[in-house]
Amino acid sequence: MKISRFAIALAASVSFVGPAFAATTALVGGNVVAIDGGAPITDATVLIDGERIVQVGPSASVAVPADAKIVPMKGKWLIPGLMNMHVHLGLKLPSATGNALLNETDAEEALRMAENARKTLQAGVTTVRLTHEDHGIDFALDRSIKAGEAVGPRIQSAGELIVPTGGHGFLEADGAAEFSKAARTQIKRGATWIKIAISGGISDTHGSISAAPMTDDELSTLIEVAHRNGVKVTAHNGSTEAALQALKFGIDCFEHGYHLNDEVLKQMKAKGVWLVPTAVVSQPGAYEFYKKIGSPDWYLDRVASTGKDHWAMLQKAIRMNINIALGTDQFPFEPNGGTTATVAEAELYVKAGMTPLQALQAATIQPAKMLGMDKDVGRIKVGQYADIVAVDADPTQDIAALRTIGFVMKGGTIYRDDANPAEIAR
Ligand SMILES: [Zn+2]
């Protein structure tokens, strides 16, 4: 008994590595946004011990230990770390920038992804869901971040995108047996989601977005295999026909949803199926981005023709109160309209009909629920990981307050503090 206790204590002490770390940290004097609605806690103190929050309340009611590291937060608004549910840290798009990466080796890609993971965390995004990365590099990066070698957000990953031959992706499979094998291979590597493409995509040069190329046998078997392993399935999809087919077999989530019609949205609502809209990729603000990376004209044409339907679908989904989790399909930190893609996405949700609070929830407690991680992340609450971001104003009044992120903590470690940049090790 004594030996095992010692082993546990030792394991705990070596796992707490990272920059600017103190055993106990107190964020003092800020306002904690009420993420479930209601009044904020003004002049609050958040006490963090190790990786988790141990106390939250009005400063007068929280006793701060003498040896705690004090971080003044007067005038700041504290929100849970943002969560971005459609990310590719190794993203390559049809463009001059993408073409330059055609001969990239896995080693080069791993280093590039590590740098993108660091920038993601700096942008206030403390959890991501990866919806395709190459060759298992994502799982290596996740292990490296957990070991304190690389810096980045918490990662949930689908591994490689599985598609029928000729589909919108890279890991091709045909027939139920090959789809089972492909799904099991990702799960063996560490996938907590399976991502499939059940229709074409904006970036394809062939095939129609509205087709449904998978057979019932392929789709139902793949979803069954994932669910038997406790893994959820999400689909890249722009097709109504493919969406109805996937809903019949128990799909958990749709990405983008460009052309989903009323019948699909109604079924999604009834079944609690999630939508990750990635509105930033098809709305006018994105053209600046596509021009910057040198995208070809045919790609810009497809973006424009898809954008109108996409926007109407998003407005409808919000009106119907469908489960929405924020995702960008661009780097979470990608510059967009004077802010990041993640913040721009949240602003688009407000423009499409959400209240600022709902948009903030779509970036915090909704993704946490979708991932099944809501006991650990998504709220500034006792027992949760101390994944906390500070901004200059109340984002539940004006979502544009997210443009002022100046402080990022993940698991009790401060990774960004614009008030004290010199204190951050890296
Ligand atoms: Zn994507």
Image (spheres, rainbow, N blue to C red):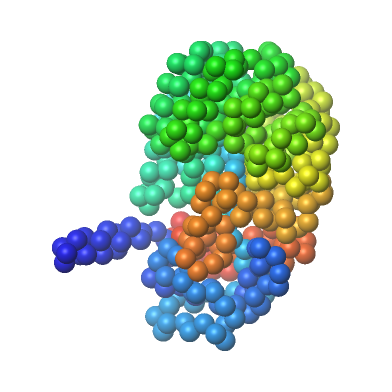
Q: Residue furthest bottom?
A: 60
**In the image, 12: left or right of 245?**
left
Q: Residue at x 60, y 39 (%)?
A: 86
Q: Is residue 107 left or right of residue 73?
A: left
The answer to which image quadrant residue 140 occupies is top left
Number of marks in the image?
0
> In this view of the protein, can residue 203 be seen by the observer?
no
Q: Residue at x 59, y 36 (%)?
A: 252
| 251 sits left or right of 414 in the view | right
Up the image or down, 277 lies above or below 152; here it is: above
| The quarter of the displayed image where residue 403 is located | bottom right
- Please say if 25 is above or below 356: below
Which quarter of the picture shows residue 138?
top left
> Residue 176 at what x, y percent from top left?
49, 16
Residue 298 is situated, as x and y percent measured from the top left of the image, at 76, 19
Of 253 and 236, nearer the camera is 253
Image coordinates for residue 136, horizontal then vertical, percent: 42, 31
Residue 13 visible (yes or no): yes
Please report the residue visible at 65 percent of the width from the left and 34 percent of the height from the top.
255
Q: Position of residue 183 (x, y in %)?
A: 46, 26
Image quadrant in which the N terminus is located: bottom left
Q: Residue at x 78, y 61 (%)?
A: 398
Q: Nearer the viewer, residue 102 or 348?
A: 348
